[in-house]
Every structure is written in structure tokens, then in C-alpha cells.
Image (cartoon, grey):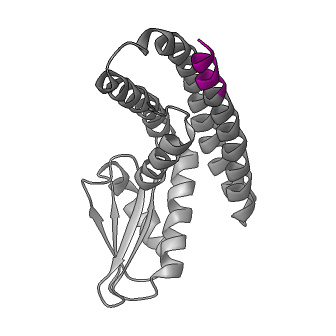
Amino acid sequence: MPDTVSKTDNFLKAIEKYAEEQRTRLQTEAEEFKETELNKAEEEGLKEAYVLIQRQMASVRTEIARELSKAEGESRKEIFRKRQEIEDSVFAKAEERILAYTKTEKYVQKLLASVKAVAGVLDSDDVILYVTDRDRKYEDKIRKAFGRACEVQTDKSIRIGGVIGKSAALGLLADETLDTRLSEQHEWFYEHSGLYITG
């Protein structure tokens, strides 16, 4: 039983550390934006995802405390399966919330800010900007935000939103998608969730 308490304490500490690091990351990202309205838009969208993840983590914490006491006699395979299920659930709900954000005017402003960021990296006349099919309706705004000639195409690999810029002449790709940002959180979640399998 002390081992279960220790695992639960480690899990709670990881959640607290996660919350602190997430808060710091949100503040840092917000400070990098020059335009006040873009600051508010991105911070609000990310805070909503942060709040959702925090709620899910509280629910996960309760579930894990219950599962750990029961799972000691079960196989490691079952524990692996449960950990993946929890991760999938947390990220599926975070993705739902971010998809809802992509239907707001704040997202459009964030998308155009991302296009400007890509333009700053890809200083070439052969740039192709890839967006979701949903975002093709903003094509004129995207071209204007890019500031020079570019091609806008749909990329089915972008499921949530944002933009990918490619330049063959430069041999560069600039990924400013929400899909990638969310995907990058998987490794962090794995390393800091406290859902370790030992023994």
C-alpha cells in the first residue's frame, strides 16, 4: 500500500509540475506577440485547452488512484493499455476543444499571424501554403497576410488547423499547425504524467 501512495504522490507532483510548466509556457508565448489583440486571442485559446487538460488530469488522478490499488496483481500489458487509453482520452478532449476554437474569429487572427510567421521564414517566391479544407475560405486573407505571391493548397494531414509553408527553392518547411503543437505535447505528457510502469 505505501508503494501505491508513493506512486499516487509522484503522479500528483507530476500534475502540479505540469500545471506550472504549462502556465509558464502560456505566459512566454503570449509575451512574444507584438499585437495586443493577437496576444489575447492565442492566450485565450491556449488557456481553454490548458483548463480542459487540467480538468482531465484531475479526473485521471482519481481514476489512477483507484486503478493502482486494483492493478498491482494485474499484468503489465493491462497497465500499458490503460495508460494509453488515458492519454488518448485526454488528447481527444483537448483536440475537441481546439477544434471548437478554430471556429472563432480569434482563430482566424491566429491563423493569419501564423501565415506572417511563415512569410518571415520562407523568403522566396515559390512558397506553397498548406491549410485545412475548412480554412480555404480564408484564402484571400491568407495571401494578403503572406504579403507576396504564394500558392494556397489543401493538405489532408492538417486536421485541426494552422498552416504549413514549403519552399522547394529554399529546401525549407515551416510548420505552424495546431496539429503539430498538440502532437508535441504527447511526449511531454508521457514524460511528466507520472504514469510510469515499473517492476
Q: Position of residue 163 (x, y in %)?
A: 41, 62
Q: Give the range drawn in magenta.
A: 1-9
Query: Is residue 9 found left or right of 143 in the rendered image?
Result: right
Residue at position x 46%, y 87% in the image: 123
Left or right: 154 in relation to 85: left
User: In the picture shown, does residue 19 fall above or below 137?
Assistant: above
Residue 147 seen in render? no
Q: Which residue is drawn at 51% across and 41% down?
A: 189
Is residue 10 something one can see in this rendering?
yes
Q: Residue 100, position in %: x, y?
A: 47, 35
* Whether residue 102 is situated above or below residue 56 in the rendered picture: below
Q: In this view, does 145 lie above or below 193?
A: below
> Which of the two residues, 78 or 83, is positioned nearer the viewer here?
78
Residue 49 rendering spot, x and y as whole percentages: 57, 37
Q: Residue at x 31, y 20 (%)?
A: 75
**Depth check: 145 or 79 in front?**
79
Quadrant location of the C terminus? top left
